[in-house]
Image: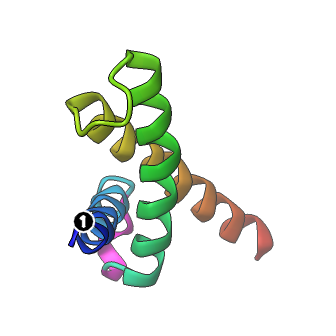
């Protein structure tokens, strides 16, 4: 059950990152939301939790770090796609 919750949270964070970065005009790309949400949650959430000294427990620092990580991964993906054109 925890795995399903983490996947859903990752998708929501990835979708929120797309909305913040202005991708909402074209709609939400759920595949991108899944990938960037999970990658951003893993990297950002893990780093912020460990830097804050919270360990691996569910804390606000990990949630904020997950969102920031998803923003960074989504922005990098959008930059890469624009560069490839």
Residue 8 highlighted magenta (yes or no): no
Most prominent secondary structure in the magenta stretch? helix
Residue 79 or residue 53, whichever sits in front:
53
State the colouring used for the structure image: rainbow
Residue 55 or residue 66, whichever sits in front:
55
Left or right, 63 with reference to 17: left
Q: Which residues make up the magenta segment?
A: 22-27
- Vertical position of residue 32 compared to residue 44: above or below: below
Where in the figure is residue 50, as x and y percent of width and height? 45, 25
Extreme residue in the right direction: 84
Residue 15 or residue 82, whichever sits in front:
15
Residue at 25 percent of width and 71 percent of height: 8
Residue 25 highlighted magenta (yes or no): yes
Where in the figure is residue 59, as x and y percent of width and height? 22, 33
- Vertical position of residue 85 compared to residue 66: above or below: below
Left or right, 58 with reference to 18: left
Q: Count of labels shown?
A: 1
Residue at 53 percent of width and 45 percent of height: 43
Residue at 24 percent of width and 39 percent of height: 58
Indicate the secondary structure of the residue bearing disc 1: helix
The quadrant the C terminus occupies is bottom right
Residue at 55 percent of width and 54 percent of height: 73
Left or right, 77 with reference to 55: right
Where in the figure is residue 38, as x and y percent of width and height? 44, 62
Where in the figure is residue 41, as x and y percent of width and height? 42, 51
Query: Picture quarter containing residue 66?
Result: top left
Query: What residue would you read off at disc 1?
Result: 2
């Amino acid at each position: 059950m925890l795995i399903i919750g983490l996947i859903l949270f990752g998708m929501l964070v990835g979708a929120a990152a797309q909305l913040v970065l202005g991708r909402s005009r074209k709609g939400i790309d759920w595949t991108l939301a899944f990938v960037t949400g999970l990658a951003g949650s893993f990297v950002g959430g893990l780093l912020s939790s460990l830097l804050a000294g919270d360990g691996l427990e569910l804390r606000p620092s990990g949630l904020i770090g997950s969102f920031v990580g998803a923003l960074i991964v989504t922005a990098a993906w959008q930059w890469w796609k624009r560069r490839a054109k």
